């Protein structure tokens, strides 16, 4: 608010400079006033003894000029609170002593709230932007909590009188809580304490000390009062849960502690954890164990991509020193290998394995008939809790004429036995790009059609540009800005008609693969009948504990989002199963702070944290360090010297905000940065870690080294040069040094910080 006020009429180019100047001026004023307060011993006028001695004189002033006295008192109180100076408690006492309980409460209550709000605004103007940037990941979690329950937390802190109110003012200013919310919650929360102090002030003559106001029993009462909202929250939560559940018959005994619906990545992990802690758990799957990941997603796609990569390596055999390499293959054999790979991995997710672990596995279509019951195969299972992990399916858009052709999706493409001669891939996201490259390398003429301005829109633009260049080099035709309108069949020929910024373009194809997103599997589960809320995108709405609007029902994986990755589904299922089983004692909030992902094109694209476009969108200040794979020895030896690694850090610091890798084995290389970000390790520590030579992982160390060189202590290095010149005996060099300078130089040259 203050920033907008100070910069409203300033040109954009000068606004940042003006804001910095305004911050400096305000900080100087605050420092001067606070320093003067202590330097000139003004705090002596805000002591208990002083007010007792001066009470008669002050009473006379209030009697003669009540309005002016009230305004002066009010203004002084606001100033004390705004600058967080000691004396607010004495001022509240004085309010009661001079103006009585009614008017004293009015003056002290509003003055303290206005002063607190000014302190809040000063803290926000001077420090919030820096703190939000410097501690972005931590503050992101804080901001989410403030958005949800900021008023509740503030009210709780205001009730605890032993907690310094000025600290609350300053800390809240660093968050994104609304000013009006801060004001009214503070006014309400501090009212009880103000009344007690003001009332004590009316008896000022009878008090021996400030400590006499708050006796140990009264302090304990306020501590309990502060804890009351925490207890009340739990009670209210239980009341809400009871209100939701009371219309259902709760069984006296339960068949199971947990029923998990869906045996994909999320469901398997949830069932595994429940069995591990010796809970009775039933896992229900209507199709195949392993879900999409095993049968139609991660496993088959990576198997196909590996075969396609071999075909690409053969085509560039000359680069590896072979004059000629012949390759002959049958596409059906390639697809047969894909299905063999699925069969090899199937035992990891099989009924036999999970039965041995203690999980009851049931094949059938489940329906949730109440918060405590699940029906499957005509049988009703009673359970303490339910985890919905039904995943998602490919989204098929309503394109006119699409039903006239046998279109492919990421589910059905694995049934192909003949290689499509002309393949249109609709969608330039991860799945579309992976499949487009794989089929192209195996011999299909591929056209990749994307409605947006570029493919891989969630990645930085340079990633998209490099990938498009790679695709074109391999013969993949890319059409961006093309919106699919209709599919026509003319003289036996299939055509996709696209709108290209007002112009129609016809694209002939033999097969079309739809890869424009996924839709949560929520139909047929009985969610509507139970009133379980869904989000606008069709996923199940859950809270931070992955709990749905029915407290005994949880959800994890693609069916709830927000990330549709196998590893995220598994990550969520720890929280959903543990909260479902042990939430009556302790619940855990799901942590999305460090989520990596990889797109398995060649070269791979891996990312964790922020990229440049997200940092700009969120207003996060950052530095960018880029290191190219063409400079990496192992990449050169492997003919994989293409791509780059890009690291975003806090300006002037080595703390990692995000990493994007576009290169060979990016999915493996990103893991070191995932660990670093999770554990708070900076680039200096990565630089100080030994990486085997020659390996691709050295790229992580080299980008850290490049960051270090960009932040080299130039002045200290100049002194180092003088030392070396002096030690060589150059007479024209003069160098004055002392032990302190030498010590600092030695630390700078040897430290990893």
Image (tube, rainbow, N blue to C red):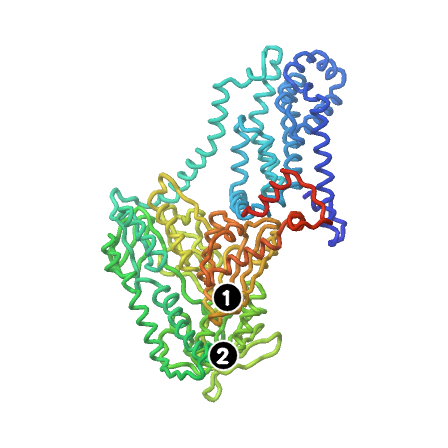
- Residue that numbered label 1 is attached to: 633
Chain-order first, disc 1 or disc 2: 2
Where residue 580 sits: x, y (%)?
Answer: 35, 46
Where residue 473 sits: x, y (%)?
Answer: 53, 77
The residue lying toward the viewer, choosing from 727 and 584, is 727
- Residue that numbered label 2 is attached to: 487
Q: Nearer the viewer, mark 1 or mark 2?
A: 1
Count of numbered tags: 2
Where residue 391 sits: x, y (%)?
Answer: 39, 60
User: Which labelled disc corresponds to residue 298?
Assistant: none
Q: Can residue 374 be seen in the rendering of this structure?
A: yes
Q: Check the image and report above or below for 703 versus 749.
A: below
Where residue 531 sits: x, y (%)?
Answer: 41, 52
In the rendered image, which quarter contains the N terminus?
A: top right
Q: Check the image and report above or below for 611 versus 254.
A: below
Q: Is residue 104 left or right of residue 290?
A: right
Q: Can residue 562 be seen in the rendering of this structure?
A: no
């Amino acid at each position: 608010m203050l920033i907008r006020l100070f910069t409203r009429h300033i040109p954009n180019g000068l606004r940042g400079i003006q804001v910095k100047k305004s911050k400096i001026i305000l900080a100087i004023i605050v420092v001067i006033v606070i320093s003067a307060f202590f330097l000139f011993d003004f705090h002596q006028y805000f002591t208990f003894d002083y007010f007792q001695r001066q009470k008669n004189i002050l009473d006379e002033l209030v009697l003669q000029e009540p309005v002016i006295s009230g305004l002066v008192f009010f203004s002084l109180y606001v100033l004390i609170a705004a600058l967080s100076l000691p004396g607010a408690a004495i001022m509240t006492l004085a309010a009661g002593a001079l103006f009585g309980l009614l008017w004293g409460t009015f003056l002290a209550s509003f003055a303290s709230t206005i002063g607190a709000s000014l302190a809040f605004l000063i803290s926000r103007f001077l420090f919030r932007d820096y703190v939000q940037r410097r501690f972005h990941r931590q503050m992101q979690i804080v901001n989410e909590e403030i958005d949800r329950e900021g008023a509740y937390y503030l009210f709780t802190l205001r009730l605890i009188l032993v907690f310094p109110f000025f600290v609350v003012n300053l800390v809240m200013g660093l968050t994104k809580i609304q000013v009006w919310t801060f004001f009214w919650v503070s006014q309400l929360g501090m009212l009880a304490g103000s009344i007690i102090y003001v009332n004590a002030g009316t008896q000022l003559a009878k008090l021996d000390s400030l400590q006499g106001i708050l006796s140990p029993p009264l302090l304990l009462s306020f501590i309990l009062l502060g804890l009351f909202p925490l207890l009340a929250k739990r009670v209210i939560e239980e009341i809400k849960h009871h209100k939701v559940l009371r219309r259902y018959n709760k069984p006296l005994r339960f068949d199971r502690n947990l029923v998990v619906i869906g045996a994909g990545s999320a469901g398997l992990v949830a069932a595994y954890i429940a069995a591990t802690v010796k809970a009775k758990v039933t896992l229900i799957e209507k199709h195949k164990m392993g879900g999409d990941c095993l049968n139609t997603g991660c496993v088959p796609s990576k198997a196909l991509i590996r075969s396609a990569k071999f075909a690409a390596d053969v085509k560039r055999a000359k680069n590896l020193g072979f004059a000629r390499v012949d390759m002959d293959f049958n596409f059906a054999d390639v697809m047969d290998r894909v299905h063999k790979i699925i069969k090899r991995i199937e035992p990891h997710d099989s009924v036999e394995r999970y039965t041995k672990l203690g999980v009851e596995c049931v094949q059938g279509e489940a329906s949730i008939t109440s918060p405590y019951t699940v029906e499957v195969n005509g049988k009703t299972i009673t359970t303490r809790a339910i985890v919905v992990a039904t995943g998602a399916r490919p989204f098929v858009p309503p394109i006119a004429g699409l039903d006239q052709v046998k279109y492919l999706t990421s589910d059905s493409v694995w049934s192909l036995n003949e290689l499509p001669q002309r393949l249109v891939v609709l969608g330039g996201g991860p799945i579309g790009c992976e499949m487009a490259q794989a089929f192209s390398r195996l011999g299909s003429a591929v056209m990749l059609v994307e409605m947006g301005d570029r493919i891989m829109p969630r990645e930085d633009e340079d990633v998209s540009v490099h990938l498009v260049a790679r695709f074109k080099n391999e013969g993949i035709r890319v059409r961006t800005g093309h919106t699919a309108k209709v599919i026509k069949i003319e003289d036996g020929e299939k055509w996709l008609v696209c709108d290209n910024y007002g112009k129609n373009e016809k694209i002939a194809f033999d097969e079309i693969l739809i890869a424009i997103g996924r839709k949560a599997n929520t139909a047929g589960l009985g969610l509507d009948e139970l009133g379980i809320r869904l989000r606008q995108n069709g996923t199940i709405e859950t809270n931070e504990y992955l709990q749905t609007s029915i407290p005994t029902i949880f959800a994890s994986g693609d069916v709830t989002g927000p990330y549709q990755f196998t590893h995220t589904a598994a990550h969520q299922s720890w929280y959903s199963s543990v909260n479902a089983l042990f939430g009556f004692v302790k619940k855990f909030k799901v942590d999305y702070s460090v989520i990596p992902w990889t797109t398995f094109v060649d070269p791979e694209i891996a990312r964790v944290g922020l990229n440049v476009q997200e940092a700009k969108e969120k207003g996060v200040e950052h530095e960018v360090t880029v290191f190219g794979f063409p400079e990496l020895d192992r990449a050169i030896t492997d003919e994989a010297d293409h791509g780059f690694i890009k690291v975003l850090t806090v300006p002037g610091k080595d703390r990692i905000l995000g990493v994007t890798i576009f290169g060979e084995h990016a999915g493996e290389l990103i893991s070191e940065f995932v660990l670093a970000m999770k554990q708070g390790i900076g680039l200096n520590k990565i630089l100080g870690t030994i990486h085997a030579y020659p390996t691709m992982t050295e790229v992580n160390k080299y980008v850290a080294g490049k960051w270090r060189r960009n932040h080299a202590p130039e002045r200290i290095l100049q002194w180092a040069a003088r030392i070396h010149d002096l030690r060589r005996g150059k007479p024209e060099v003069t160098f004055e040094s002392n032990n302190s300078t030498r010590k600092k130089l030695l630390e700078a040259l040897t430290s990893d910080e």
